[in-house]
């Protein structure tokens, strides 16, 4: 049954196991051709991933600005947000005269 399930998944983008679990094929990336071959699955573009993370950080900034995450991608988005926040409200620099 495994071979038939995998074949159905690759041909249709989804399959159902004997235990009634549904499996879906999802790809993360970009394509230069908007037409996907057949009905093989769902494409999540990198642009969508970036927009989702930017929105997530923006909506949860009051909490996230105090967190040190071990997730490198989320950490990068937090760093970018902190960078933008520091440009929005510059602090007085101490200068030697």
Image (cartoon, rainbow, N blue to C red):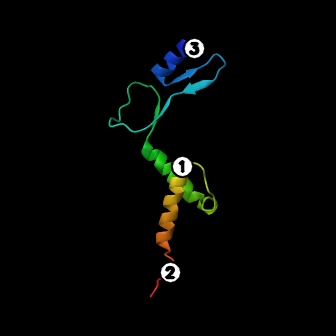
Furthest-bottom residue in this view: 97
Q: Find disc 3 in the rendering and name its residue.
A: 2
Asked whether, in this view, residue 83 is left or right of residue 19, the answer is: left
| Quadrant in the picture for the N terminus | top right
Furthest-right residue in this view: 19
Q: Residue at 38% of width from left, 26% of height from top?
A: 37
Q: Position of residue 69 (x, y in %)?
A: 61, 53
Mark 1: few, some, or many residues within 10 Å (few <14, many ≥20)? few
Q: Residue at 55% of width from left, 56% of height from top?
A: 57
- CB contact under 8 Å: marks 3 and 2: no
Residue 20's tag is none
Q: Position of residue 23 (x, y in %)?
A: 57, 25
| Quadrant in the picture for the C terminus | bottom left
Asked whether, in this view, residue 31 is left or right of residue 48, the answer is: left
In the displayed structure, 74 sits above or below 30; it is below
Residue 72's tag is 1
Residue 92's tag is 2
Q: Residue at 64% of width from left, 16% of height from top?
A: 18
């Amino acid at each position: 049954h495994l071979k038939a399930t995998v074949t159905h998944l690759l041909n249709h983008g989804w399959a159902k196991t004997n235990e009634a679990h549904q499996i879906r094929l999802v790809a993360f990336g970009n394509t230069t051709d908007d037409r996907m071959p057949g009905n093989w699955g769902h494409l999540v573009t990198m642009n969508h991933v970036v927009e989702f993370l930017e929105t997530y950080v923006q909506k949860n900034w009051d909490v996230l600005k105090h967190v040190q995450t071990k997730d490198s991608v989320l950490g990068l988005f937090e760093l970018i947000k902190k960078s933008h926040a520091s440009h929005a409200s510059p602090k007085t620099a101490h200068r030697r005269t």
